[in-house]
Image (cartoon, rainbow, N blue to C red):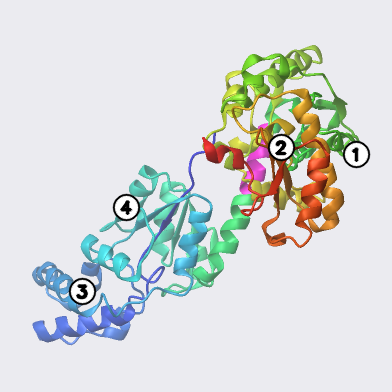
């Protein structure tokens, strides 16, 4: 399984514009020492340790004391006057959107670095100061940083020594040519370009990881529901292995809506993949019928236990599910545990591919499922604690079909939840309040429910879990 994303950032001239504050502090230091520093020259290429900048202008034994005095003066002259550079907050937010950690690694005095972080409100997890050049590599390796962003050639050296991808911005004093010569992997004009770059980098690198994973397996049977995730996995397996080394298998039972079956078959056939449709008997498992919070465990256990012997009979090496990286962190998911315990692979999850990335890659590949609404099994519509029966599942399916006839193309996401004594209808929030709500409620009641209401919160995937 892929580890958490960790991105490192330099501070001076990468995240913050230190020049005004640094210059003001140098002037104050010059007054204290009676030295006229060439301020414009010294602030043109900020990044190296302070003592390196002071050394050409002071006696050797005066450098260290001058550095200490500079750091004290810095508090009054350079914290409140230093702003975040354009795109800094957005760059950090982009890492957070991918659930990443943010490590700030800088040559600056740690206390002053922390004060800058607090003053401009930089959202970081760790501040590591007083490290420079290749010395940054130890911190980057320790924190598992895979991408390090800086503005100086010495930031490039640190990233390369750590085995991290070096991303350079042109907001410091180094030129594009100097950064490229130092060996940087990527050059951006500023951090304003970073979010789009990160999105693309993670998508392409994760797709590459998925292809490598599938290629090493030799052959794959995909537990295929016809939804966006398993359809994408099926297409990816065909790309990596060829259709002759891939099988799709859809478990047919009362919990699979009839409306899903034809399109799923058509998609698999379009890829040149043979589709198996074995019957599954999750309804015969007491834990499934009881419909406690762990119902999905029994369903997935049944599915994998049916598919595994089929794969073995056909000489297929791996049974794989469409679990994605978001599923793995979504909280209560007993079905994932059941699949893992039975040896099923989850290549999308292991490559780190999120639901949004699966949809974007599907769009790029021209797959018709790229924008398909989520379509969980019918049993997910039955409230926990209410027994799952074929009658209830058929009633839900009739009610959803009736609701779609009323709403037509207006609705994308729709669920009829069986709450035992009544039905709750969830539809896209932007359709609420609904002018023809009474017509919708009447259609659901006619499908077999005594009572029905439209949920004012609208559609939420997994809303039944709210009660757990």
- Residue 167, percent across and down? 50, 60
Q: Label 4 vs label 3: CA separation?
A: 20 Å
Q: Which residue is mark 3?
A: 54
Magenta residues span 204-213
* Residue 209 is inside the magenta segment: yes
Decide: marks 4, 2 in contact (CB < 8 A)?
A: no
At label 3, counting other C-alpha atoms closer than 10 Å, the crowd grade (few under 14, some 14-19, many 20 or more) is some
**Residue in view at x 72 percent, y 18 percent:** 283
> Where's residue 256, x and y in %?
79, 30
Query: Which of the two discs, 4 and 2, labels the residue nearer the N terminus?
Result: 4
Residue 136 x/y as whole percent: 34, 53
Disc 4/disc 2 C-alpha distance (Å) = 50 Å
Residue 400 colored in magenta in the image? no
Q: What is the spatial separation of the Cα atoms under label 4 and label 1, in whole angstroms?
A: 54 Å
| Circle 4: element type | helix
Label placed on residue 270: 1
Q: Residue at x 20, y 74 (%)?
A: 54
Q: Nearer the viewer, residue 336 or 375?
A: 375
Q: Which residue is mark 2?
A: 376
Residue at mark 4: 135
């Amino acid at each position: 399984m892929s580890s958490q994303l960790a991105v490192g950032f330099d501070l001076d001239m990468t995240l913050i514009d230190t020049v005004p504050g640094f210059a003001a502090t140098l002037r104050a230091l010059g007054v204290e020492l009676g030295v006229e520093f060439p301020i414009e020259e010294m602030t043109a290429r900020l990044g190296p340790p302070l003592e390196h900048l002071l050394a050409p202008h002071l006696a050797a034994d005066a450098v260290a004391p001058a550095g200490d005095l500079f750091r004290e003066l810095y508090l009054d002259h350079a914290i409140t006057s230093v702003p975040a550079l354009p795109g800094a907050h957005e760059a950090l937010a982009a890492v957070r959107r991918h659930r990443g950690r943010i490590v700030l690694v800088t040559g600056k005095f740690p206390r002053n670095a922390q004060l800058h972080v607090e003053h401009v409100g930089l959202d970081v997890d760790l501040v590591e100061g007083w490290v420079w050049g290749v010395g940054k590599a130890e911190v980057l390796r320790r924190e598992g940083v895979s991408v390090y962003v800086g503005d100086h050639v010495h930031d490039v050296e640190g990233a390369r020594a750590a085995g991290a991808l070096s991303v350079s911005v042109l907001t410091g004093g180094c030129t594009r040519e100097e950064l490229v010569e130092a060996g940087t992997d990527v050059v951006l004009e500023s951090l304003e370009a970073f979010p789009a770059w990160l999105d693309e980098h993670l998508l392409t690198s994760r797709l590459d990881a998925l292809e490598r994973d599938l290629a090493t397996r030799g052959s794959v049977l995909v537990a295929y529901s016809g939804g966006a995730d398993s359809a994408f996995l099926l297409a990816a397996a065909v790309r990596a292995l060829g259709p002759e080394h891939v099988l799709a298998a859809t478990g047919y039972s009362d919990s699979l809506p009839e409306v899903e079956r034809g399109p799923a078959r058509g998609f698999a056939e379009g890829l040149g993949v043979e589709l198996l449709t074995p019957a599954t008997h999750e309804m015969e498992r007491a834990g499934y019928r009881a419909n406690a919070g762990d119902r999905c465990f029994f369903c997935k256990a049944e599915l994998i236990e049916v598919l595994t012997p089929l794969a073995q009979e056909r000489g297929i090496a791996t049974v794989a599910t469409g679990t994605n990286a978001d599923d793995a962190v979504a909280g209560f998911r007993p079905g994932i545990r059941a699949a893992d315990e039975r040896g099923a692979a989850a290549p999308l999850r292991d490559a780190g591919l999120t639901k949004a990335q699966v949809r974007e890659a599907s769009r790029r590949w021209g797959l018709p499922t790229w924008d398909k609404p989520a379509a969980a099994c019918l049993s997910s519509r039955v409230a926990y604690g209410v027994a799952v029966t074929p009658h209830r599942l058929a009633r839900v399916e009739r009610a959803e079909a009736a609701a779609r006839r009323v709403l037509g193309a207006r609705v994308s996401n729709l669920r009829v939840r069986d709450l035992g004594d009544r039905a709750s209808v969830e539809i896209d929030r932007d359709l609420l309040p609904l002018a023809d709500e009474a017509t919708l409620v009447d259609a659901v009641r006619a499908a077999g429910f005594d009572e029905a209401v439209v949920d004012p919160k609208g559609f939420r995937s997994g809303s039944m879990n709210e009660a757990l």
